[in-house]
Image (cartoon, helix red, strand yellow):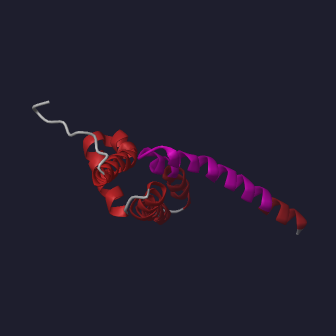
Amino acid sequence: MRGQLALAVIVGLLSLAGLLIVGMAELIPLAGPIITALPAILVTLAVSPPKPLLAAGLYLVIQQVENYLLVPKVMQRAMDLSTLTIVFAVLAGATLGGIVGVLLAAPIAASVILRHIVRVRQRLEGNAPPACTAAN
C-alpha cells in the first residue's frame, strides 16, 4: 500500500511539473494555446479515436472562457477600464496591428483615456494649456 501511494505521489508530481512546463507556453500570444493543447490531443489520439475530439473541445472551451470572460475582467481590474472598452480596444488592435496590436491595445487605450481625462480636468479647473490654432 505504501509503495502504491509513493508511486501515485511521484507520478502526480511529475504530471504536475510537465503540465506546468507545457502551460508556460500559454504566455505566447495566439500560438500558446495551440502549443498547450497539442500534447493532450496527440496523447489521447493514441488511446482512442473519440478522445482527441473531447480533448480539443475541452481546450476550445477553456480558450473561449479565457478570451471572452477572464481577459477582459483581468484587464478591467488592472487598468480600471470597462470590459467593453477593453474588448473594443483589443478588436481594434487586432485589426490595425495583428498580434502586436492585440498586445498593445489595452495599454494604449488606457493611456489615451487617461490623457483625455487629464485634459478635461485641466479645462474645468482653468489650467488648460492654450489650444493650438491655425493662426498661431
Q: Main secondary structure of the magenta part?
A: helix
Q: Position of residue 67 (x, y in %)?
A: 41, 59
User: Which residue is painted at 14% across and 30% down in the image?
Assistant: 136
Residue 107 position, x and y percent, is 40, 46
Residue at (32% x, 49% y) in the render: 122
Quarter holding the N terminus?
bottom right
* Residue 95 location (% of width, % of height): 25, 46
Front residue of 11/49: it is 11
Q: Residue furthest right?
A: 2
The mark tally for this picture is 0
For the record, the magenta segment spans: 9-36
- Observer-nearest of 68 and 62: 68
Q: Is residue 49 left or right of residue 1?
A: left
Q: Is residue 103 left or right of residue 28?
A: left
Is residue 106 rendered to the left or right of residue 95? right
Q: Residue furthest bottom?
A: 1
The residue at the point 69 percent across, 51 percent down is: 17
Is residue 6 in the magenta section? no
Please tell me which residue lies in front, 76 or 29. 76
In the foreground, 94 or 118: 118
| 12 is within the stretch colored magenta | yes
55 up-or-down from 102: above or below: below
Hey, which residue is sitting farthest front in the picture? 126
Q: Position of residue 132 (x, y in %)?
A: 18, 36
Q: Residue furthest left?
A: 135
